[in-house]
Image: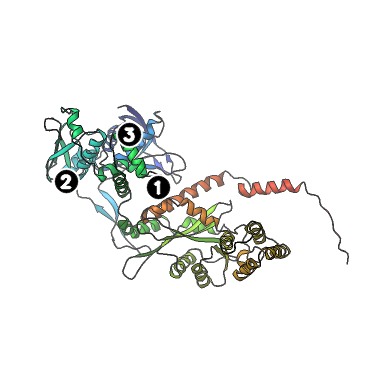
Amino acid sequence: MSKIPIMLKSNGNWDNYGRFRDFEVDAIVVDDNANYGILSSTIAEQLSIDTSDKIIEIKYIVNENCPPMEIRNDMGVRAYMETKKENKNLGSYPLCISVRDFNMELAINNESTSAGSSGSLNLLEFPSSPAIEEYQSEIITESTQTYIEEGQVYQDKQTVAAAMKNYSVMHKFQFRVKRSSHRSYWLICVAESCKWHFKATSINDSAMFKIRSFSRQHTCCLMDETFIQRKRTAAVLGSMVVPKYCDPKTVYTPKDIQTDMLSEHGLNLSYMQAWRAKEKALQFLRGNPCDSYNKLPKYFYILEKNYPCSVVKLKKAADDCFLYAFVALCTSINGWQHCRPVVVVDGTFLKSAYRGIMLTASTMDAAGTIFPLAYAVVDSENDASWKWFFEQFKEAYGERPSMCVVSDRHESILKATSVVYPGLAHYSCMWHIWTNIRSKFKKGHLQLHELYFATARSYTMDEFNERMLKIEEVDLRVKSYLYDIGYHRWSRVHATVNRTFTMTSNIAESLNAVTKDARELPIFDLFEYMRTLLERWTKEKLSKAKGTFTYLGHKYNKELEDNSTLSQKLRVRYFFLVQ
């Protein structure tokens, strides 16, 4: 056990850029195995905060590109301590302390509130009891408690039982339950001769449990513990590996669980036991996928309140079940007027429990980076879902002069755009057309590859016709196939509006790659992931824009400079036409 010095910033306020300003400085020293109750009570004592009617909010900044991280429970304290151990300097990772009233909280007073409907915010007075008031700052809510001692208070019996199961794994011993009721929880060692015991009882018949007696010293021999081996439950093992799955991008397989449990805790798990532990960990972290859908109405309500002028829609089926959900944030809507009117749409599969499809619409901003416009979750890619998506998109973004849509050749997209945006130019991704050519026609792929893409990118009719003749020489069927699709769908020179550089749907494919791991999350977490992703990208772009002092963005300014350098080596010649 070691001591960790921590700087405290208090009596300040957060600005719009996630920075804590106008604060006062103080400091504390805590043990590296401190829990949330110990940390918050130490802070309260140092800053003279009365926790009987105040709630302490503890936040810290990991890096400038991330929003402040709040410590809410024991797991948050553990994550902070592990981060702090890497740099124990007093000034590293200071805690930013805010204080608010305890007995008055904002809550939504309409359980059936749907996105787009009006709800009311009421002040709810929380009931209190002498037991709760006495132990308010010390109540342990997490089962992943690493240090257990007499006097600790847990929120309920289930938490203290789970904490002891986790504790037994961490310290490599076995116990059995001697007595268990709604008022008491009594454990003894599996070896009858051992004097190790643990006893916790309820506080004044409340749900909270307090540890009354804990003899942590084992008097049994090692052989007794070795021969009496009990299986660890998936819930206990799952609670131990929860931190591994906090980041959706983390790959932590059942095989990894087997390896780590054996090396760190001496537990030899089967693959199925490890798999069940993983499933339990994901359930602890993400909750029930079904409950995730129930959170959407309130989440969308809060989204509309925090992002005014956003378009947020939720549609239910005839049986009152979820059907579609659509989000276009106000930051994207405001930025659309400064982007080229080229919209790239695509759909990609969800990999969560209830599957589905995520539809996205994106464009390029003035800096040449991806600019997400809208995202939605639907049942499948069909005529009805794409029509509904474009209807919501039109409500959010309207229609601009010379606007066009680029996508793959999905028939439902073609039908939906023709209905919702009649007369709007719709182009196909030239890469998707090439993959179709490659699968349909087996002749001359190497020659056709170069010819096809050169033809699609042609700027003049003479170039286009010349290259089409060469395609005809390689395989006449390919020319007929491209003609049937329509030259205007894939050829730059035949396009009725300026497609600029957007000849493929790579923008959408890149966004799909970014959200690959997030598409395994329950629907509520997926929408929240998309919101934080867009918010992070917006802040990064704002930071880059403030450091750009040229008329064009860095990407296009560099391209212009390179072209200017190359043009200086060119020689100008005059040609005279003889009639």
First-in-chain label (3 vs 2)? 2
Name the residue tied to disc 2.
Answer: 207
Three-letter amino acid code of the residue under disc 1 = Pro
Name the residue tied to disc 1.
Answer: 248
Three-letter amino acid code of the residue under disc 3 = Ser
Q: How crowded is mark 3: few (under 14 residues within 10 Å), some or many (20 or more)?
A: few
In the picture, measured across the screen, residue 378 lies left or right of residue 339, that is: left
First-in-chain label (1 vs 2)? 2
Q: Relative to 549, is 357 above or below?
A: below
The image position of residue 250, as x and y in percent, is 41, 44
Kindly indicate the quadrant of the structure image that contains residue 8: top left
In the picture, measured across the screen, residue 146 lies left or right of residue 527, that is: left
Q: Distance between the residues labelled 1 and 3?
A: 25 Å
Q: Residue at x 16, y 28 (%)?
A: 220
In the picture, measured across the screen, residue 105 lies left or right of residue 375, that is: left
Name the residue tied to disc 3.
Answer: 263
**Disc 2 secondary structure class:** loop
Q: Which residue is drawn at 21% across and 38% down?
A: 164
